[in-house]
Image (cartoon, coloured by chain):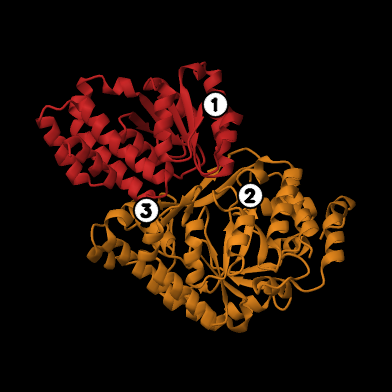
Chain colours: A orange, B red
Amino acid sequence: MKDDEIYKDRRYRINELREKNEKMTSRERALKAINFEEPDRIPIDNWMVPEIKKRCMDYWGCENEEELLAFLGVDVRDNYGPSYVGQEFKKFDDGTVADLWGVRRKIVTYGKGTFHEGTFKEVAWSPLEHMTGVEEINAYEAWPTPDWWDYSKVKEECAYWHPEYFVLNKGDRLDRTAQLKPMMYLRGIQQTFIDLAVNPDIVECIRDHVVNYFLEYNPKVFEAGGDEIDMFMMGDDMGGQRGPLISVEMWRRYFRDAFRKYCDIAHKYGLKVMYHTCGDVYQLIPEFIENGLDCLQSLQPQATNMDIKRLKQKFGKDLSFQGGMDIQQVLPLGTPEDVRKMVKYAAENAKRGGGYIFGTAHNIQADTHIENVAALFEAYHEYGVY
Amino acid sequence: MSTLKKLSEYVEKGKSKEARALTQKLLGDNISADKIVHEGIIAGLDAIGEKFAAFAAFVPELMVAAIAAQESLEVLRPKMTQGTLHKTLGTVVIGTVEGDVHDVGKNIVAMMLTGGGFNVIDLGVDVPPAKFLKEVQYHEAEILALSSLYTPTRLAMRDIMEALKTEGLRNKIKVMVGGAPIDQAFCDLIGADGYAPDAPQAVKLARSLLA
């Protein structure tokens, strides 16, 4: 940490609050929360785009990301799973690169020349998009196999954070345990929606390839991680801004069974399950609970029906939550006072009896001013205390 | 049940083949293209829009209904260019703003606007402000429809509004905005003419902007 006065002044408030409030390790704190017990303060998870991490390090005088997370009191440490040792991902002349599924991706830059400039890896080409039947899809030559991974370092990488921090096995955004997302990458989002409406055999075929891969891959990861993984995270985007993308009936028909299997495997290894989805999934939450989910993240407050107070009242006995901090309006467009109010509201309504982890609805985006990020973390430490 | 009502049902249920065939038959029976559009296709789209609003239909159902409407319109296209239909419903230039490559929401809106009888010029994704301005003038569009998914990229909408003013085009065109991080407050902030939270409402908004 840089110790110039300016950085010390900026760090003062968070350090002061942490010294006063914290009475246990991050791991103890998060374990209590997900087991519906009240820890010393609400645990903190952190999702930021790289541009914001950089801005935070510059602001608080941190030399690297590890220092930043430690200073901010972030309790969760991400584990990305095994190392990829399969064939080298193909690079193409148009600048795209194939991913695990053989989907070609390109780097897209937004906000060129502005303070909020950043990049995203977007799908540029979906290999199954124009295929017309299951035979062709079954014959696709790039279906991945769990043999493409080296699991030997998972335990060591998780243990690096123990006993201090809480280790969340979440995979990378592009190879995270899921069903609908890989299908959309492989087939194209639009074609996937059309398939869901009119091509059930194609949906089932692609889904089975995806699911069978993860059903084989996940036990290997959990076996390798031993006792060093604290929680498993999977993710799919089932919600839009104003409701689920598909009906509850369609979810039951295509996605329920594997959702349950994914949860069962993690539970067999003693791991609780966190599930990421964007958007409003209120109608699906009873299904998630019934099929084994422990923690829903990352609640998106601007989405209809995802108010944390209501969710806690309705489902808080059976389900824990992560998220609730708005990245669509409050963080990019609001004032530090708006940010503080948002944190206070979530803390007051979700902390009772444990079962809540602070977090943003998705990565804090590059259009967010540092003053609001600072207000967010200061408020976490101020209002999170039990 | 009247044949037009049947067509609206095919559109609503996303039965493309049936919608196409029935449209052909209706033309053969000398029903006017205008009547087929309004009482068959648009009626079907409105019906699925209402179900969508009531959470009785979702994105897959909306998408196949829009495709069925488009297929049906394809059959009518030769007749439509002979009439006044395009002019009465208007031209919409649509695109995802610069820096953003998300197009699913935008495509559904474009499909439903097309199905609803608008002349839609889809500029695709990552569209620079200058291109929007150029195409709006070239096509003499009545509506410019802008989409974004990310919060940082939505700021490009503000730049486009400014550019329209600078070029003296602002009072000649209606601007509608949409996408996950957009709401009425953001629409008001940048001075756009309307915001719609989903595709069916975007079609209604487009109609009302030109009413």
Disc number placed over residue B75 in the picture, else none: none
Please give the residue where the numbered disc 1 appears in the rendered image. B161
What is the distance, in whole Å, between disc 2 and disc 3 at their CAs? 28 Å
Chain assignment, label 2: A
Circle 3 residues within 10 Å: few <14, some 14–19, many ≥20 = many
Q: Are marks 2 and 3 in contact (CB under 8 Å)?
A: no
The residue closer to the viewer here, A348 or B161, is A348
Chain ID at mark 3: A
Q: What residue does disc 3 label?
A: A188
Circles 2 and 3 on the same chain:
yes
Q: What amino acid type is highlighted by mark number 2?
A: Asp
Place residue A197 in its image quadrant: bottom left
Say which element carries label 1: helix
Q: In the image as oriented, which residue stretches furthest toward the right?
A: A5
Q: Looking at this view, is A362 or A68 the one in front? A: A362
Q: Nearer the viewer, mark 1 or mark 2?
A: 2
Q: Which residue is drawn at 35% across and 56% down?
A: A187
Left or right: residue A132 versus residue B190 is left
In the picture of the structure, the residue carrying the numbered disc 2 is A326
> Measured from the top left, where is residue B128 in percent x and y?
49, 33
**Label 1 neighbour load within 10 Å: few <14, some 14-19, many 20+:** some
SS at mark 3 in the image: loop
Identify the secondary structure beneath mark 2: loop
Name the residue rendered at 58%, 40% in the picture: A111
Between the C-alphas of marks 1 and 2, the distance is: 26 Å
Q: Where is residue B143 in the image (x, y as percent from the top left)?
A: 42, 25
- Give the quadrant of residue A323: bottom right
